[in-house]
Image (cartoon, rainbow, N blue to C red):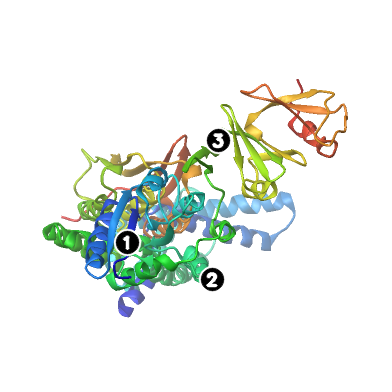
Amino acid sequence: MTGARPLRVMVIDDEAPARNRLRDLLGDCALKMPLEIAGEADNGRRALDLLPSCNADVVLLDIRMPDMDGIEVAQHLQKLDTPPAVIFTTAYDAYALKAFEVHAIDYLLKPIRVARLLDALSRARAIAPLRPEVLDEIRREGRSHLSVNERGRIHLIPLGEVLFLKAELKYVTVRTAEREFLLEESLAKLEQEFLGRFVRIHRNCLVAKDAIRGFERASMVDADGESDGGWAVVLNQVSEKLPVSRRQQHIVREFGRIL
Amino acid sequence: MSINQNANAVALPNFRNLGILLRILLIVDGISLAAALLQTSEPLPLAEVLIEMSAQVQPVLLLSLLVLAALGNVLRRLSYAGGIVAWLAIELGVVTLIYFLGHRFFNAGGALERYYLFTLLVTGVLIGYFDLRGRALSPALTEARLQALQARIRPHFLFNSINAVLSLMRHDPRRAEQVLEDLAELFRALMGDNRQLTPFTQEIALARQYLNIEQLRLGERLRVAWEIDGFPGDALLPPMVLQPLLENAVYHGIEPRVEPGLITIRLRREGDRIRVVLRNPYRAENDHHSGNRMALANIRERLALHFDAEAGIKTIATDGAYEVQIVMPYVKEKP
């Protein structure tokens, strides 16, 4: 490692004392290996904002944080062009620790020992990137945001703003009141993750229940080219109308908001 | 400690407690009803038998309750055996009094010995019942302590606090000392014998120590308002009631928020009762954990042990806020 570029470390923790402590410890580690502090953030959103510009090789990521927990932050930052290695930190979280053990994910227990930190950092460049399906498994509930990579930056879409999700070939289109995003995820998995928030109106479409203004009779040609003269969903905020497939006609009755 | 426990198990009930009085009333009337049923099962004569029996039993019962409630403190100061003897003596005295009054004014009949025997039997049943009840609840006291300990020391809190102290060591050793002292006192209280009522000032001090530690971790995000003006300084509270509730408030109300949140603690005397209200911001969708039942159940149990039916705890989740309300009797410190 001699002469190598110093390892750039970012600290993400909502508690100031915890960040101070890590800064001290990183100072100690710097005496033994070339490293520098790339940045600090007190919540996940800020961390995702800073990450593209601060070129961190490693993030020390607290799990329990308000608004967006560490697991979700890790999910979003995988969308970066060159995602940093992730080392989770936690004071106590029996559930997550078990999952980390199972999947050989690196973590540090607070209070963190300097030897342990040094050890984790010296292996950091070799840490295998986190696999999305593993994070899916560890996560206890659905994400609070969806995310897309836009010109190297991570754009977060609050779940509450999503009107509908539509599968198109390899992608899922995310529609909000303002615009559309392309998501590289599977519609079936999204449906499972956000159970209860969306309703499936068609093989290729999930609509946010809150976004449904009502239903109306429409003779439209749906994606399969079958004209069924069935129902269409009318949405709040946007003028697009979405066809309800024959198989999903029952939801019209369940919602009962016929226009 | 074991001697202490035994002493606790066999003690006369607190006759000044409404719950205890109600239990006595129900048991005695239950026995009367059973006795009446033995005599007849036809509805009409049964009513007559019941009325006749009531006329004999109720005056004795009500007068006994009055006397017991009046002498409650004296009785509890006696040894257990002495208390039993005194209780039996009081009952026989009351029966004799009522018997002669009845004889004089209503010419009611029957041998006095029969009433004596009935009274002794019923009182014996009550003594047996309260003895068993005391024994049944006594392990609960010890267990409550253990549970309290487990419910209270959230590993999350312990490790984060230690971490916070470590962060102070290099830059602000004095503050670190102070936090460690607070932490030590908090744990001493947690592990102490929490069976006796304690002065409320002590409870407040403990709560403040706890909040100091959390303040260090959470900084600006944690705001606390105390509304305890005019609360009587001699009031006694069951120990370790405030702190676990505050810990819940921090864990579920403050930690999941990015923006600052306010915890309000209000203590108020309302006549012969005390009302404790704890309020914190709360958004269900922010809360990833639902572990506050244990602490609440534990506190409910301990309130029942101290005050039986005279104390209550309830929680109210309103729009954006969560409130715990406790009502308990106002018990004064003995001067």
Q: Amino acid at mark 1?
A: Arg
Q: Secondary structure at mark 3?
A: helix
Q: Amino acid at mark 2?
A: Val
* Quadrant housing residue B322: top left
Q: Which residue is mark 2?
A: A102
Q: Considering only order in the chain, which callout, 1 or 2, is on the residue closer to the N terminus?
A: 1
Marked residue chain, label 3: A
Q: Which residue is mark 3?
A: A160
Disc 3 residue crowd, few under 14, some 14–19, many 20+, Cα 10 Å: few
Q: Which residue is mark 1?
A: A5
* Residue B18: image location, x then y, percent: 41, 51
Q: Residue at x 50, y 61 (%)?
A: A129
* Residue A150: image location, x then y, percent: 51, 39
Instruction: Using residue B25 as the reference point, say whether residue B41 is left or right of it.
Output: right
Instruction: Using residue B324 as the reference point, say whether residue B112 is left or right of it.
Output: right
Q: Residue at x 41, y 70 (%)?
A: B143
Q: Amino acid at mark 3?
A: Gly
Can you name the residue that lies furthest to the front here? A3
